[in-house]
Image: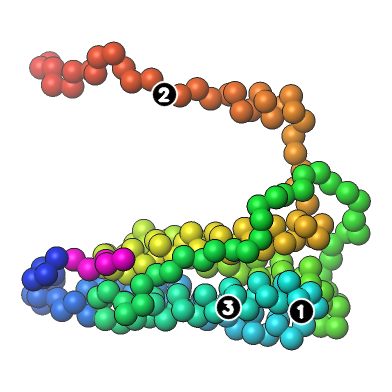
């Protein structure tokens, strides 16, 4: 996908004149994208630290695939952020390998509590930390994209958010399958009432005249 503006288009600063493509970034953008990149590094560092503690091969496979995707996406973001132009490697699409079947309802479990030592770490804890990391990345990218002026960087960030959502969904399904993450439901009667609490908007038969003279 190509993101760059039309050929020959220039940007202006009211005090200094023309802005080169490499410097086509606003102040909020510089700070927010810096937060995004630092957050991505933090997430990858966390995955690296956790990997040797993973017991379940399925979770290790998810961790490795997500880490590799994060790394490529990080490099794409750094590329366009530093150049202000289309990255050499466009944003890719993350495809999870899990199905999307959630198990609803609650079963009794032991109350959750913080670890007392590193030796207590489990796959439940690891998958929860991974889930928190990608949810944080999705939030930071969304906020940054809303403040980004460079069209290439803005589109790269916006296209990256669905990938974090997909990774979070994959992890939540993994957790649900192992009863780490349980999903309660309303009763069918309450749910039906909520589902039917909204109706489609209807177009007015005649638009109000806002040009009336008073």
Q: Is residue 2 magenta?
A: yes
Q: Are marks 2 and 1 in contact (CB under 8 Å)?
A: no
The front one of 110 and 99 is 99
Q: Give neighbour class at mark 1: few <14, some 14-19, many 20+ (Cα, 10 Å).
A: some
Disc number placed over residue 19 in the picture, else none? none
Q: Which residue shows up at 33% across the image and 20% down it?
A: 203
Q: Which residues are magenta?
A: 1-5
Q: What SS does tag 1 mark?
A: loop
Would residue 121 appear left or right of 1 to someone viewing this image?
Answer: right
Q: Earlier in the sequence, mark 3 or mark 1?
A: 1
Q: Earlier in the sequence, mark 2 or mark 3?
A: 3
Quickly name the residue at label 3: 67
Quickly name the residue at label 1: 54
Image spot of residue 85 (x, y percent): 25, 75
Q: Are marks 2 and 3 in contact (CB under 8 Å)?
A: no
Would residue 165 appear left or right of 121 to someone viewing this image?
Answer: left
Quarter of the figure with residue 128? bottom right
Q: Nearer the viewer, mark 2 or mark 1?
A: 1
Q: Which residue shows up at 68% across the image and 75% down it?
A: 61
Q: Are marks 3 and 1 in contact (CB under 8 Å)?
A: no
Quarter containing the N terminus: bottom left
Q: Is residue 156 magenta?
A: no
Q: What SS does tag 3 mark?
A: helix
Image spot of residue 140 (x, y percent): 48, 65
Q: Give neighbour class at mark 2: few <14, some 14-19, many 20+ (Cα, 10 Å).
A: few
Gap in Å between the C-alphas at discs 3 and 1? 14 Å
Q: Give neighbour class at mark 3: few <14, some 14-19, many 20+ (Cα, 10 Å).
A: some
Gap in Å between the C-alphas at discs 2 and 1? 50 Å
Q: Earlier in the sequence, mark 2 or mark 1?
A: 1
Image spot of residue 54 (x, y percent): 76, 79
Quickly name the residue at label 2: 201
């Amino acid at each position: 996908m190509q993101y760059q503006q039309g050929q020959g288009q220039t940007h202006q600063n009211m005090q200094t004149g023309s802005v080169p493509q490499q410097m086509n970034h606003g102040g909020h953008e510089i700070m927010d994208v810096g937060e995004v990149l630092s957050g991505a590094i933090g997430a990858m560092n966390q995955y690296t630290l956790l990997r040797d503690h993973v017991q379940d091969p399925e979770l290790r496979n998810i961790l490795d695939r997500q880490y590799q995707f994060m790394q490529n996406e990080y490099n794409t973001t750094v590329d366009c952020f530093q150049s202000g132009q289309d990255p050499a490697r466009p944003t890719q699409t993350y495809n999870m390998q899990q199905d999307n079947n959630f198990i609803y309802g609650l079963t009794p479990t032991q109350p959750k509590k913080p670890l007392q030592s590193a030796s207590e770490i489990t796959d439940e804890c690891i998958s929860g930390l991974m889930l928190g990391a990608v949810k944080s990345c999705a939030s930071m990218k969304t906020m940054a994209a809303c403040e980004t002026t460079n069209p290439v960087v803005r589109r790269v960030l916006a296209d990256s958010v669905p990938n974090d959502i997909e990774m979070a969904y994959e992890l939540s399904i993994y957790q649900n399958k192992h009863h780490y993450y349980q999903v309660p439901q309303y009763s069918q009667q309450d749910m039906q009432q909520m589902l039917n609490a909204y109706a489609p908007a209807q177009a007015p038969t005649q638009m109000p005249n806002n040009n009336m003279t008073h």
